[in-house]
Image (tube, grey):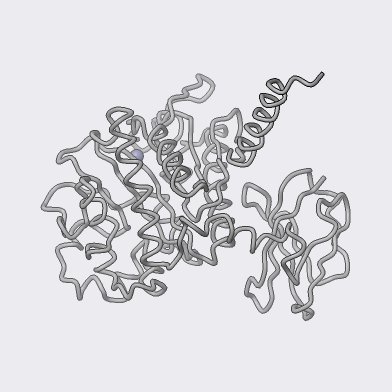
Amino acid sequence: MINISKMKNYFFLIGLVLICLKTKAQVFYGMNNYTQYHQGNLPIIISVPHGGLVAPTSIPDRTCNNPTNVTDSRTIELARQIDTALFNLTACRPHLIICNLRRTKVDCNRNISEGACGNSQAETVWSEFQHFIDTAQFIAQNQYSGKALYIDLHGHGKMPYRLELGYGLSGTSYNSTDSVLNTASNIAASSIGDLVHTNVSGSSHSELLRGKNALGTMLANAGFPSIPSQQSPNTGGFPYFNGGYNTFNHTCIAQGNTVNGLQIECDSIVRASYLNRKKFADSVASILVRYIFIHQNLNLLTNCGLISDSKDNSDLEVHSIRIFPNPVSDFFQISSEDNQGNYEIVIKNNFGALVFKANSHSKFNVSHLPSGLYFVSMISNQQQVWSGKLVKQ
Ligand SMILES: [Zn+2]
């Protein structure tokens, strides 16, 4: 006789497992789990370089270049709560890159020589962290047609209590008029310079920095004073963090990068307790969704994840370009109806490293690659015309 009650429980458990599988981000770990990358499906990438507490004795404390070793306390917890808030809002997840190593051991927001002080383990951790950011940006840019937003998340202990949004511009530059901020040289030096050219809201650079729909203004309206913003258009003479290594190297300030982003330095109040972080994280999630909709015409409440599916070649039925077989063990082919000309195939691994490159050919041999997930790009006339995932068995 069938026990209906047990059957119900059984199906409930299966359903729960399926939901967990569907909603849990895929996580990749670096050496000794010192770094981790939660691969998401939103066009939002959050990195946390200074929140780690792990301090192995095998890596000496950094002493080179008179280093700053202060931990940005509870920024990992804050990033996880922002991740949860975004998931609750959109049913999709941001990309999350975390350094678990204490800043005394490695600084993933400095260049490698200053950040690792010549220690080979610290150099590996630093490189993995940077590659995870590159990988996340690569995926998000491809899934959302170049509309990824990058946030390097930090905490500061200064007064006044306010968020410091670092766009790469010096604090004194905000003393300038809007017309000076809108000059080509200031736009080129800005970590949201690309958004100035691509936004659909008709916003100028100064409006994106401190207009009514600037990120700082939205945060200040939600009860989190921010600089720059409409409420605080300049620093008011107080010290200000304008962005570090990651802001300068993983946004459009860097040559060849079109990702818009910024460093967010959170004051100690927003990080102080679970409830403070939750209040802030919930606000950040809804503000990011609104910001991306206003400026990039991307509605993440209805469209997240769907876009990734439409760009993802593993769905064999929606597209004129496809990889087969996929998963692959040795040779794969690319079937293409509308790209029959010469093209180049580039494959990167999960760390963003180039592992394969070949010109158009009937078959591509990847038998030498280790098992795992790879990202394939088709390049034609030096432009990426298509990208998709490849699973190597
Ligand atoms: Zn920091």
Residue 155: give x, y in percent of width and height.
31, 38
Whether residue 69 is visible, yes or no, is no
Left or right side of 332 for 254? left
Residue 149: quadrant of the picture? bottom left
Q: Nearer the viewer, residue 116 or 166?
A: 166
Q: Nearer the viewer, residue 305 or 99?
A: 305
Left or right side of 294 for 9? right
Left or right side of 378 for 123? left
Residue 180: give x, y in percent of width and height.
21, 73
Residue 98: give x, y in percent of width and height.
48, 37
Q: Residue at x 42, y 34 (%)?
A: 76
Query: Which quarter of the rendering shows the C terminus?
Result: top right
Left or right side of 345 for 206? left
Q: Residue furthest left?
A: 236
Q: Quadrant of ligand 1?
A: top left
Q: Nearer the viewer, residue 380 or 170?
A: 380
Q: Residue furthest front?
A: 1
Does 55 appear above or below 277? Answer: above
Q: Residue at x 54, y 62 (%)?
A: 144
Q: Nearer the viewer, residue 122 or 13?
A: 13
